């Protein structure tokens, strides 16, 4: 993939009167950036449209791209365990990603290797996330990793500088009913990459999610 590609953004493909099922269907036609060319399908968020908490990750991975659902691979299992340990019930959560198509580069065996999306991809995909948030109207948002953080707060955002504490919804991200708070933590895939420090990384993720649980209470 090269940088001299047209990225008109997703807005023209977002339905005028969206519902979550209509968003999922319309996403499959999206040509807002070039990532659709190498992805199996677009992956919209999943969960109760009345969920109190929205969890936002980076992009679908290899498993998610094949299944058409977010967080169904190894990182998703880590997230499920962490939510349970933090006392957050699944029915209270809507999970999604700031980029809806899988960006990858090369193969490792039969598995496609994740490649982080660029800010241009995040920007092109923003209308889908905005539409989701207008429908779900969560009380709080948990940002899973730096890409999700940069999608809301800009390129200077650093997870390590503010993880685990309450943040205000960004003023330059207008939505009809803005979330009352935002909390940043690491992406659950970081736990899988931690190797010898995996338990410590997992415990830190759970601790951050417990802060979110307290804010929901």
Image (cartoon, rainbow, N blue to C red):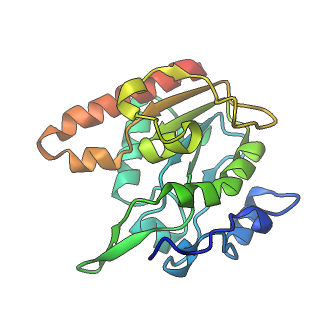
The percent coordinates of residue 154 (x first, y second) are 54, 40
Which residue shows up at 53% across the image and 74% down it?
A: 4
Task: Please name the residue shown 69% across and 34% down the image.
Answer: 172
Do we see residue 99 in this rendering? Answer: no
- Position in image of residue 201 (x %, y %): 25, 35
Picture coordinates of residue 9 (x, y %)? 68, 64
Task: Name the one closer to the observer, 170 or 192.
Answer: 170
Q: Is residue 135 visible?
A: yes
**123 vs 84, nearest the viewer:** 123
Q: Residue furthest front?
A: 4
Q: Position of residue 189 (x, y in %)?
A: 33, 50
Residue 2: quarter of image = bottom left
* Residue 209 horizontal side relative to residue 217, left or right: left
User: Across the whole image, how many numbered discs are drawn on residues?
Assistant: 0
Q: Residue at x 27, y 44 (%)?
A: 191
Indicate whether 72 appears above or below 179.
below
Quadrant, the N terminus: bottom left
183 relative position to 208: left or right: right
Q: Does 8 appear above or below 166?
A: below
In the picture, which quadrant includes the C terminus?
top right
Task: State the residue at coordinates (68%, 35%).
Answer: 138
Outermost residue, right side = 17
Tell me: 81 left or right of 50. Answer: left
């Amino acid at each position: 993939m090269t940088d001299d590609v047209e990225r008109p953004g997703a807005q023209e493909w977002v339905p005028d009167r969206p519902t979550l099922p209509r968003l999922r269907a319309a996403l499959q036609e999206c040509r807002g950036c070039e990532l659709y060319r190498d992805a199996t399908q677009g992956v919209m968020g999943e969960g109760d449209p009345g969920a109190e908490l929205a969890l936002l990750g980076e992009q679908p991975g290899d498993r998610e791209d094949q299944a058409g659902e977010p967080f169904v691979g190894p990182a998703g299992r880590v997230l499920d365990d962490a939510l349970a340990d933090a006392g957050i019930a699944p029915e209270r959560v809507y999970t999604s990603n700031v980029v809806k198509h899988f960006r990858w580069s090369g193969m490792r065996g039969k598995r496609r290797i994740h490649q982080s999306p660029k800010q241009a991809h995040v920007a092109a995909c923003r209308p889908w996330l905005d539409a989701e948030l207008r429908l779900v109207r969560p009380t709080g948002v948990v940002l899973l990793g730096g890409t999700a953080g940069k999608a809301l707060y800009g390129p200077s955002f650093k997870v390590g500088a503010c993880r685990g504490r309450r943040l205000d919804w960004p003023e330059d991200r207008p939505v009809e009913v803005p979330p009352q708070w935002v909390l940043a933590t690491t992406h659950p895939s970081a736990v899988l990459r931690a190797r010898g420090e995996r338990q410590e990384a997992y415990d830190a993720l759970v601790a951050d999610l417990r802060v979110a649980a307290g804010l929901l209470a």
